[in-house]
Image: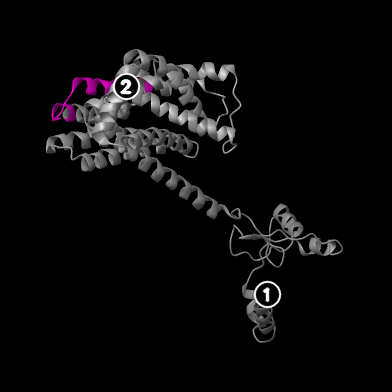
Amino acid sequence: MLAAAASVKLSTAGTATAPKMALFKPLHLPPLFAAAAAAAGPRPLSLSARPLYRQQDPLFLASRVASPAPPPPSATADGARPVEAAPAGAAPEEAARRAKIGVYFATWWALNVIFNIYNKKVLNAFPYPWLTSTLSLAAGSAIMLASWATRIAEAPATDLDFWKALSPVAIAHTIGHVAATVSMAKVAVSFTHIIKSGEPAFSVLVSRFFLGEHFPAPVYFSLLPIIGGCALAAITELNFNMIGFMGAMISNLAFVFRNIFSKKGMKGKSVSGMNYYACLSMLSLAILLPFAFAMEGPKVWAAGWQKAVAEIGPNFVWWVAAQSVFYHLYNQVSYMSLDEISPLTFSIGNTMKRISVIVASIIIFHTPVQPINALGAAIAILGTFIYSQV
């Protein structure tokens, strides 16, 4: 269009205003630039330095008429292809992945709340944490063995090296599990989880003084509200018990070492999160069983069981079964979610899980909470969230 307009203007100038053409002096290019311009030929008009589509040369397209290639799915009708085309189906896949993670988190939190409620009910009527811990691991082991036998889940391919690497992880897991159950038997569920929210402080201190790792200053500063909040909650706890407090602290320390051993010993082991936790439960059960018999024993269990059934009724059996099954399920879902998300997202989810457990247990068990105690819990949990961010 511009060329046509230029030709019209030139023709008009040649007939009516020919003398005016002398006013324009011809532009003489240097020989080098003139040769380059002649070789390049006329440049097509372009409105953008970055074209949205890459067009094929018409002469090249004409030479391929005899055997045309089918255009790609993203090509336009004239054969043009976008320079940067988003992969088809990327948005639906990402949405599906986010929905899957959301389902994992909601299921994880719900199962954890249910477990803590039934676990506390059982311990109130049957205060034998060693047997209660053993039954939780036994239920999970039985569930996974049945799943592997019926091919509902694929059994992992393990060797002797795998079980050797898993052994220190299982020892730490057993100690942490029993210590947390002992704490739950002695104090309120909310208090146990407030103290257990201080696990990041143990993680940093152990990594610093035992492993020689260094952290930036914001990480150390984020520990101050965690330690201060836990201390404030412990001092103002109405039903404070030293055994319950120490149980929660030992559980924190044991789970920190469990995570360290897991990272160091399980590198290069290709086992899914679900099967990894199943193997961990079985090995922990084998470690815990002899100690449970030594610490409590069948005679104590039988007497306590008869008393609980006489006071509660048949519902007590259901409570024991529920706390055992839900313990395995919530841990299994948490390990499955770890396959899909980053450790940071998992840490944030774990913090939110504690909040849901604390609130639910206070409502269900009518736990008396002083305002200063609630403030300490809020500060500790906020510190845990800040730690996960920095």
What's the residue at 48%, 37% (across, down)?
A: 336
**Hey, which residue is sitting farthest top in the picture?**
294
Horizontally, residue 30 falls left or right of residue 230, namely right
The magenta stretch spans residue 117: no
Question: What secondary structure prevails in the magenta region?
Answer: helix
What x and y, as percent, mark residue 9? 65, 80
What x and y, as percent, mark residue 362? 21, 40
**Hey, which residue is sitting farthest right in the picture?**
66
The disc placed on residue 3 is 1
Badge count: 2
Q: Residues within 10 Å of mark 1 (few under 14, many from 20)?
A: few
What x and y, as percent, mark residue 271? 56, 29
Question: Can see residue 184?
Answer: no
Q: Is residue 58 above or below residue 386?
A: below
| Quarter of the image that includes the N terminus | bottom right
What x and y, as percent, mark residue 216? 34, 26
Residue type of the residue flagged with mark 2: Trp
**Badge 2 is on which residue?**
301
Seen from the viewer's position, the closer of residues 58 and 91 is 91
Please report the bounds of the magenta region as a residue range: 233-257
Seen from the viewer's position, the closer of residues 334 and 50 is 334
Hey, which quadrant is residue 88 in on the image?
A: bottom right
Seen from the viewer's position, the closer of residues 63 and 268 is 268
Secondary structure of the residue carrying numbered label 1 = helix
Residue mark closest to the camera, 1 vs 2: 2
What's the residue at 66%, 60% (across, down)?
A: 74
| Quarter of the image that includes the C terminus | top left
